[in-house]
Amino acid sequence: MPGLEIEKSIGEVLGMDARQNALELVGYLRANEMQFERGTGYWEDKLYWMIKYKDEYVCFILLNGLEDKTEAEGWTVWSDDSGSHGFADFPLDERMREIAWKHVDVCAHCGSCKNPGGTRKRIFGKAFDNVCITAMKFENPDAEAVECVKKIAEIRKNDILKNQ
C-alpha cells in the first residue's frame, strides 16, 4: 500500500524499540491529518520523508541513518518552524521544555540553509544562538522524546492553522 510506505520501511530497517517509537510517532502524525512525502533531490535515494500539514512543513523523518552514518537503530526527526515564531514562547511544561532544549539543532555548517552559521532563535522561552533552519533534531528518540516531538508537531499544526 503506497500510503503506508513509511510504516513498511520502519518495519524493515529499525530494531524493536526504535520501531515502536517510530510507529507511535507516525501513527500520531497520520491521526492528525499530516501528509507524508518522500524526499527528493539529495534525499531521493534515502528513507527520508517530509511531513506536511496543509502543504506546510511540520517535520522531517530519516530512517536507518544518523546524518551520513548508517546504523540499524538509526532514525532522526527534525522539527520545522518555517520562520514562524510558534516555538518562541509557547508554554510547555518544564520536562518537555528541557527535552526540547536538549535537542536544539545547532548549525553544523552543512550548507543547506540560507544563513550559514544558523540564526538566533527563541525556543520555548529560551534564546539560542547558531540554530539551524530546523529548530530541533531528535536522533533515535526514546518514548519520552517522541512525546515531545508530538507536542512540537501539534504546536506547528496550530501555528499553520492560525496563519492561514
Image (cartoon, rainbow, N blue to C red):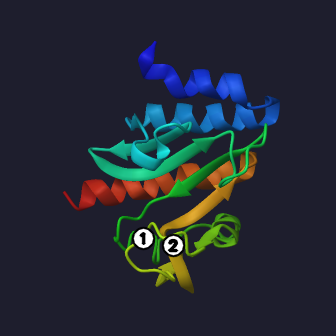
Quadrant where the C terminus lies? bottom left
Which of the pair 12/81 is nearer the observer?
12
- Which residue is under mark 2? 132
- Quarter holding residue 7: top right
In the figure, is residue 94 to the left or right of 44?
A: right
Circles 2 and 1: CB distance less than 8 Å?
Answer: yes
Q: Amino acid at mark 2?
A: Cys
- Quarter holding residue 92: bottom right
- Which residue is under mark 1? 113
In the figure, is residue 139 to the left or right of 85?
A: right
Q: Position of residue 38 (x, y in %)?
A: 43, 36
Q: Amino acid at mark 1?
A: Cys
- Quarter holding residue 11: top right
Q: Position of residue 161 (x, y in %)?
A: 27, 54
Q: Give the vertical position of 20 relative to 123 (above or below).
A: above
Q: Residues within 10 Å of mark 2 (few under 14, many from 20)?
A: many
Residue drawn at 35 percent across, 55 percent down = 158
Which of the pair 48/89 is nearer the observer?
48
